[in-house]
Amino acid sequence: LAKTTQPISMDSYEGQEVNITCSHNNIATNDYITWYQQFPSQGPRFIIQGYKTKVTNEVASLFIPADRKSSTLSLPRVSLSDTAVYYCLVAPYTGGFKTIFGAGTRLFVKA
Amino acid sequence: EPEVTQTPSHQVTQMGQEVILRCVPISNHLYFYWYRQILGQKVEFLVSFYNNEISEKSEIFDDQFSVERPDGSNFTLKIRSTKLEDSAMYFCASSEPGQVTYEQYFGPGTRLTVT
């Protein structure tokens, strides 16, 4: 499984756009990139998944460059409630789904 | 919106005792998972389960642990002889097969405290 590297923590202010970048230099051809969000004392929640280029949903955008060695989760206009830990996962789509979470990025949104 | 449920929300047990953590996955999901999270640490994969058998397991999931789908709705994690270091939040998750997605739906967790 590809190793991922994310910043340990980030601070932002309400209303700002936040970009969290994840490095995955040894990503394999059949690997997908998935981001999860976790609030304290809750289970992780799926945010977005992509393979290449750009993916957007109602919550976030995911930018993946052509070499796929990194990815950037973009959260538009964050609010205090976006304060959470954000995890980048890289894994192949195969039966079994051995999902490995890294340390994540702790985002703190200030008023 | 359908959700994964877990019971109990908090379980306190003495070292050496057996515990069973229960989960009800989303009804049309076919892949099931258990994770644990020790306080202040990352989420750790324990096991995935499909078609009534274990698909993958981590090195944490040793002989002390077992999983079962005793009926059409429940998915359980049994810890045979609990140790102090088993104290953690245990999350159950489920996902649909047949899609290219890692969208797993997590339950609210069971906080296990071993004394």
Image: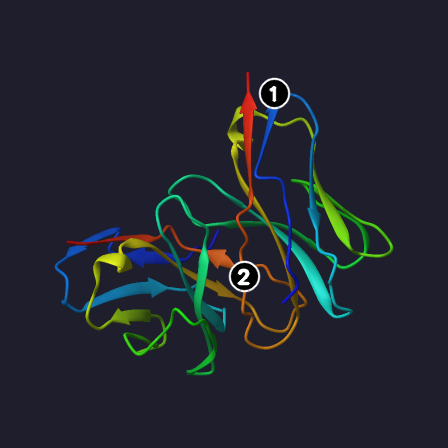
The disc numbered 2 marks a residue on which chain?
Answer: A
Q: Position of residue B41 (x, y in %)?
A: 42, 48
Hey, which quadrant is residue A28 in on the image? bottom right
What residue did someone put label 2 on? A100
Q: Residue at x 56, y 68 (%)?
A: B96
Most extreme residue toward the top is A111
Label located before the other in sequence (1 or 2): 1
Q: Where is residue B108 in the image (x, y as percent from the top left)?
A: 37, 50
Q: Residue at x 65, y 21 (%)?
A: A15
**Which numbered mark, 1 or 2, is in the foreground of this view?**
2
**Any mark on residue A14, and which?**
1
Describe the colour scheme in one phrase: rainbow
In front: B95, or B66?
B66
**Left or right of residue B71, residue B16 in this image:** left
Q: How many marks?
A: 2
Hey, which quadrant is residue A8 in on the image? top right
| Kind of residue at disc 2 | Ile
Q: How crowded is mark 1: few (under 14 residues within 10 Å), some or many (20 or more)?
A: some
Q: Position of residue B66 (x, y in %)?
A: 31, 76
- Secondary structure at numbered mark 2: loop
| Kind of residue at disc 1 | Glu
Hey, which quadrant is residue A58 in on the image? top right
Residues tagged 1 and 2 counted as in contact (Cβ below 8 A): no
**Left or right of residue B13, residue A9 in this image:** right
Spatial separation of the CA atoms under disc 1 and disc 2: 30 Å
Q: In this rendering, is residue A3 above or below B108?
A: below
Q: In this rendering, is residue B47 above or below B55?
A: above
The disc numbered 1 marks a residue on which chain?
Answer: A
Q: Quadrant of the N terminus of chain A?
A: bottom right
Q: Position of residue B106 (x, y in %)?
A: 45, 55
Q: Residues within 10 Å of mark 2 (few under 14, many from 20)?
A: many
